[in-house]
Image (cartoon, helix red, strand yellow):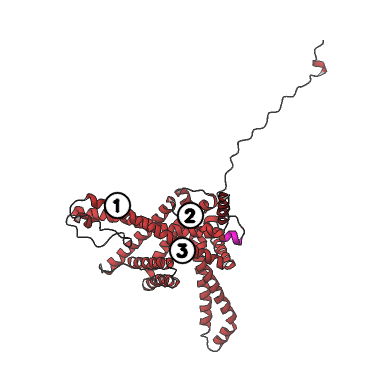
Amino acid sequence: MAGEKEKESSQSLDNLPFTKVFQTFRIAIQPSKLIIALMAVVVLCITGWIMDYVVIAASGAPSEAGTFSSLWDAVGTGFHGAVYSLLLLDISGVATNIAECFEAIGQTIQDHYIYSIIYIVIALVVVSIAGGAICRIAALQFARGEKPGLGEALNFSTKRFVSFFAAPLTPLGIIVFMGLFIFVLGLIGNIPWAGELLVGICMPLTLLAGGLMVMVLIGAVAGFNLMFPAVGYDDADCFDAISRAFSYIYAKPWRMGFYTALAAVYGAICYLFVRFFAFLLLWVSHRTLQLGILGDNSKLKTIWPQPSFVDFFGGPSSVPSIWTESVAAFLVYIFVLVTVGLVISFVVSFYFSANTVIYALMRNKVDNTALEDVYTYPEETKTEPTTPESKPEETKTPPESEKQPD
């Protein structure tokens, strides 16, 4: 009896939609998603470092910190601050750290707008391919328990690259167009005598355009997370993805907010768990190496300072005395950097996987579409070539003249 009651309570919990969010960790930790996310992180970091090197070399200030490196440090600090504040349920701390991240991004765009535009375009291309592939794998895994291969997922995202790339940009284009319309009305207001009269007459159009800008802005900010999953789940084009995201946001805003907040708290816990696992990996490896290197361990301190939970690379290291120590320190740095990249890749994979699950839940609630309903490639039905059936030979009755006499 007790076992049946536990089974019934477990089934009743599974029927609650929000519990599906807790499947995100299992979905996000899949190796194929981590590999795709890691490749995207590597491409974005290498792109930023190359652009920093070119800009610094052109300016002739080698001691100056690069734009990408400075922004990376600022966003990383704000991200960790937001995670720790979220676990402490310090909502003001979360808002402050997120605001500092956006302030750093905005300041970078304002100070280096050409640099920022180039990098944003490259980043959007990379994210469209990688994020689309992760959403596709997450959709099939969540809906049907299938795990498509790495090549299949990347093939899906590259074929639908236009939809992934254009979905975030289309709302921005609408906002810019409406803004230009209001700007033109402002220019008309400069006409002597008639200008102010035309502005007053066109005031309803101004308010209408402003209202559309606000609606699109709110829908784009709140529904951005659902655009990629819409393409990955339903093979939607960019306009259909935007329409679905907007309709789900405005139809069930509180439910969307609840799912997002739940995924954020759960994601923060999962991130700390993954980070702690990576720290234990490095710490155990470092301590075991330290037992094997005899003496005062100065050699190990030179090539690999002891890592900490906050800093995987450890504190400042000693200056290498010979070239072999320099090479060893560089190799150790690369492998520790890969470990850091895998932790960041989990964050990327969790983000897209969680939003895919949330999209499926919102679609189920608003459109009453089953969670198992996901777009799949139309199967080619192979039919065997049909051959006409052989008809039985008809027995012909010979004519009377051909009959043999008895």
Q: Secondary structure at mark 3?
A: helix
> Residue 304: x, y in percent?
25, 56
Is residue 383 among what the camera can see?
A: yes
Q: Residue furthest front?
A: 1
| Label located before the other in sequence (2 or 1) | 2
The amino acid at mark 1 is: Ser
> Residue 86: x, y in percent?
43, 67
Decide: few, some or many residues near mark 1? Use Cα within 10 Å; few <14, some 14-19, many ≥20: few
The magenta stretch is 362-370
| Label located before the other in sequence (2 or 3) | 2
The residue located at (42%, 50%) in the rendering is 31
* Left or right, residue 148 beside residue 378: left
Q: Nearer the viewer, residue 284 or 6?
A: 6
The amino acid at mark 3 is: Val
Q: Closer to us: mark 2 or mark 1?
A: 1
The amino acid at mark 2 is: Ser
325 inside magenta stretch: no
Dot label at residue 285: 1
Residue contact at pointers 1 and 3, CB within 8 angstroms: no
Q: Secondary structure at mark 1?
A: helix
Decide: few, some or many residues near mark 3? Use Cα within 10 Å; few <14, some 14-19, many ≥20: some
Whole-number angstrom distance, CA of label 2 to CA of label 3: 29 Å
Dot label at residue 265: 3
Give the labeled residue for mark 2.
Answer: 157
